[in-house]
Amino acid sequence: MPVYSMTGYASAQHGASATGAETDARAPQSRRLGLEIRSVNSRFLDLSFRLPDELRAMEPALRSLLTARLKRGKVEVRAALENEDSNTLQDPPARLLQRLNSLQDSVKSWLPNAAPLSVADALRLCANAHSGNEDWSEAVPALAEEVLTALMSAREREGKRLAAMLLDRVKQLRALAQQAVPMVPLLVEQQRLRFMERWKEAMALTDGATLPEAARDRALTEATAFAIRIDVAEEITRLDSHLDEIERLLKKGGEVGKRLDFLIQELHREANTLGSKSAALDLTRISVDMKVLIEQMREQVQNIE
């Protein structure tokens, strides 16, 4: 399965689809339907609809369509109805104008201070009354399916790019971990030599006398504690395990965003521990470089479904 991003955008108009299909014969011909869907990242699936009054009844069907194919993301659906020729105004029927005038007189009889209807108000009300009989029950779901398919394609393309970037960061993290592995034995050996020098200095101060047992035990304890403190083998092993799981999830695809987010947190924890155990500037640099890469991964994982 592909990896999907939660970021995407798609739009279409009825009769002007991306495939160039002709206008559906079942569609209303007097007005044009435009639909767009945009999505950004979110922890859960958050749907919002901005529909004209004539399409409010279609919201449950649109919601059902989206929830069947989208799992996460903040998704906004916008629809608009426009005349085929926006510069053309139809003459309002005299019957409707008479009805508006009668309603206005009735309202003013109760509310004498109410503002009178303007020409724009009358034209808008007549246009709404004229278009209220149009049936969009078939056109809206068909167009929504088309736009949703385009959105999924856009999210898939973005998800593919994100997966490639994450795999590249995984490769860089593995390289840094391999740099850290041989440093630890070298540091332990260097510290052992320092302890030996201190031991010899202590022996010289005693003029050849036997060094007290307590001093010898203390030196051995310090050497052992140092070796334990700087040993990052366990952190490197866990880090490699997390990187293996990230690669597996990216190749598997599907709904992997939340699991990837958890693994990124674990990677950050191991890099922090490695830095806290650092006994050399080179190990500190490796830890810092790891944190930079992991932070870059964290920002991108937030966009994966």
Image (cartoon, rainbow, N blue to C red):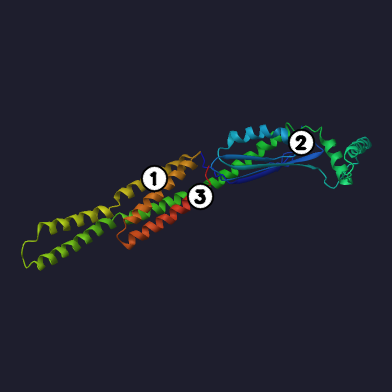
What residue is disc 3 on?
A: 300
Q: CA distance from mark 3 to mark 2?
A: 39 Å
* Residue pictured at 63% horizontal, 39% vertical: 148
What residue is disc 2 on?
A: 54
- Which disc, if any, is residue 242? 1
Q: Secondary structure at mark 2?
A: helix
Instruction: Please determine whether, in this image, residue 253 is positioned above or below residue 199.
Output: above
Residue type of the residue flagged with mark 1: His
How many circles with numbers are drawn on the protein? 3
Sequence order check, earlier mark of 1 and 2: 2
When asked about the image quadrant of residue 287, the answer is bottom left
Q: CA distance from mark 1 to mark 2?
A: 52 Å
Depth check: 276 or 148 in front? 276
> Dot 2, crowdedness within 10 Å: few (<14), some or many (≥20)?
some
Q: Is residue 196 left or right of residue 28?
A: left
Q: Is residue 43 left or right of residue 190?
A: right
